[in-house]
Image: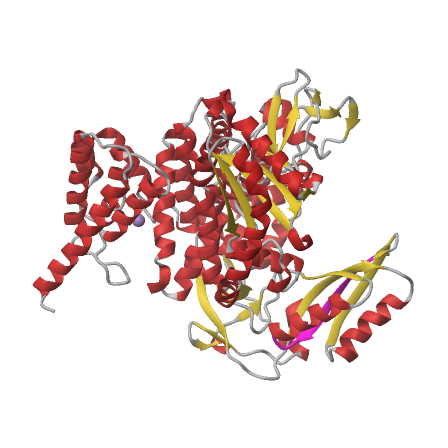
Amino acid sequence: MSAELLRSADDKIIHNAYRKLLRTIKNPIEAADRRMIREAYELAVEAHRPQRRKSGEPYILHPLAVATICTEEIGLGPTAVVAALLHDVVEDTPITIEQVRDRFGTRVAQMVNGLTKLDSAYNAESAQAENFKKVLGTLVEDVRVVLIKMADRLHNMRTLGAMARQKQLKIAAETSYIYAPLAHRLGLYAMKTEFLDLCMKITEPESYHDIARKLADTKRERNRYINEFIKPLTPFLNDLGFPYKIYGRPKSIYSIWNKIQTKRVPFEEIYDLFAVRIVVDVPSEREKLACWQVYSIVTGVHTPLPERLKDWITVPKSNGYESLHTTVIGPQGKFVEVQIRSNRMDEIAERGFAAHWKYKGVNNQPDVFEQWLDSVREIMEDPTSNAVEFLDNFKDNNLFHEEIFVYTPKGELKILPEGATALDFAFSIHTDLGYRCTAVKVNNKLVPMGHKLNNGDQVQIIINKNQKPSEDWLKMVVTGKARSKIRSAVKEERRNLGEYGRETLMRKLSKFKLELTDEIADRLYRHFGYGSYVDLYYALYTEELTVERIFKEFMVEGNTLVEIPVRVEDNQLPPGRSVERKKDMSKARLSINGEPAERYSYTMATCCNPVQGDNIFAYITANATLKIHRTTCPNATNLMANYGYRIQKAEWVHTPGTTFVADLKITGIDDGPGVIERLTHAISSMLNLNIRTFSIAGDQGYFEGRVSLVVQNTDQLHIAMRRLEELPNVSTVERLM
Ligand code: MN
């Protein structure tokens, strides 16, 4: 094709995408908005004209798709569409934020600014975390910015195919680390599910396609069952006298895989591959009653499991989710989850935040989002938290958890994440109450500060003005707020005490006519493995590190200190775990970045012990060696999300006869001295595998064993785990990460 033809073909595709975008805007658009959208579109088309995506498409199709997701899947309005269309122009084209402000006003300019990545030079060490912090900063100002950011990420995830493998892994890690939990927190369930599915498609492609195929194969059978389940309900539902929808919804591939992993059952044995949903169409003042009527019909026909009733209608989740869930026993004795909700609740469940605003004020629900935004604001404003720590805090405790409801002595309701402790409660009321907390009464009984709260508890905090938080407190809390407050108090204390350590060092250096420069401090803390100057000075204060030791390993050269080179004899290597492993095991063949791994210095990560067949990647550690992690390793996600630029591609080169160590935890019922024999016998003779270490501990009729097995690949490992599980008395077998 000639350049001209190509361009006109592109123009057609682009114009169609634009028309599609306009069609997805449901509500009538005012003329002024329409003009603004048109203008943003034209500006973006021109600005991105020379760019193409990795897939070869014109770049502008990306902002158009993002804008379409904003309208179609999140339900955002014209201003958000304009910002979505312009979201990459400042970052990727000569257009400046001032030009955007001149043409589209301050609001749009602020949104586009929020969507523009920070200068990567800003903080190379944790650019991703800094970016996320910036995004959250805009969240508390204008939640639409975060919603557009999520749409941006969703489109990038949907079109990742053209990227290099390690880039895919990095983006998938960020997505499962940050965006999926955030989608959950914002009530965007459909988006969260898609994020996790797309991540799995990248990190576990074989399992993903395997489950997808099996789901397709069993679809007909499943539909037949759903019809059988629904049929006896319909006459009763029809009698209710209001419109409703009832249908079966397949569960996501990720959630099925998750179940296969955690329960260690094959696909064929997973019963809840779907849920039945009943959505009633009634005015908002009648919706609660209608939902309970439906509940009563369902449980009248199919026997419910009472402990599985979840009522998020009376008190919604703090991300706005409202629904009634129950599990009943359907035909053939199978468990079926049933979800009952109104149209309004359904829209909130699917579209989350944006839909929530639309219905704001309905039913006088307390504004749970506002409460949550307040807590985000508070974490944001903490000046002592660095970006990575901030992200950790935020992610761990604010996003995925289920919730409990507890009360102040005055009967005020507080929502906390499941697992929250009495001390968390104190911090959730007021920082000072947390700092001064000395004792706690739950339902009028004294309990330890780390006492786990239950739904409905009434909690009273007893304070003492001389109380001071210590590092141990971190073990007694789970919420981000409490953790970051305790950390900053502890840090403050360390910083103060560290001043003494710093002075000691300065005194010593001055004897050599040296000043304590950043360069010296930097070298020292890195050399001795501390996280920062503060930690270095504090270690000097506590004498964990001494000045004498520093001068054993460093010497003065010019106006600075340099490391004294150490000569390591082969036979002087410290006896480490990995060394011991290397000795008696043939090393598996790996390739790193397509080259034989022998060219690099690498070790297997001990957090996840990869074995041949696992999906893996290489990570460049701080001292420039490589560590091989599994793509599913929980640490790895963190590493990839925060330090994506350190990720390298690693693959197994198939070589028979190589071996690995995999650690298993086995639990079961201890019926006397035969247990160990049976297990070791099963492993060594039945499975013909070698055991490296084996320890077992029993308590009140239960045992817990830890076995390190030498295996050749994941297939062999999985067979071994299945066989062990089939042994009488064994209840669970899991692989330790
Ligand atoms: Mn983008």
Image quarter of the N terminus: bottom left
User: Residue at point 44% right, 51% down?
Assistant: 194
- Residue 732 in percent (x, y) is at 74, 60
Q: Quadrant of residue 58?
A: bottom left
How many numbered marks does the figure carry? Answer: 0
- Within the magenta stretch, is there residue 689? no
Task: Specify start and end residues of the magenta stretch as a single range.
Answer: 703-713
Q: Is residue 553 above or below residue 187?
A: below
Image quarter of the C terminus: bottom right
Q: Quadrant of residue 492?
A: top right
Q: Is residue 253 above or below residue 496?
A: below
- Residue 159 in percent (x, y) is at 34, 58
User: Residue at point 44% right, 65% down?
Assistant: 648
- Within the magenta stretch, is there residue 712? yes
User: Residue at point 62% right, 81% down?
Assistant: 586
Residue 131 seen anywhere in this rendered image of the structure? yes
Nearer to the camera, 631 or 625: 631
Q: Is residue 430 above or below residue 699?
A: above
- Residue 378 in percent (x, y) is at 50, 29
Q: Looking at this rendering, what residue extends furthest in the bottom direction?
A: 656
Nearer to the camera, 733 or 384: 733
- Is residue 674 toward the left or the right of residue 557 in the image? right
Nearer to the camera, 112 or 118: 112
Residue 507 seen anywhere in this rendered image of the structure? no
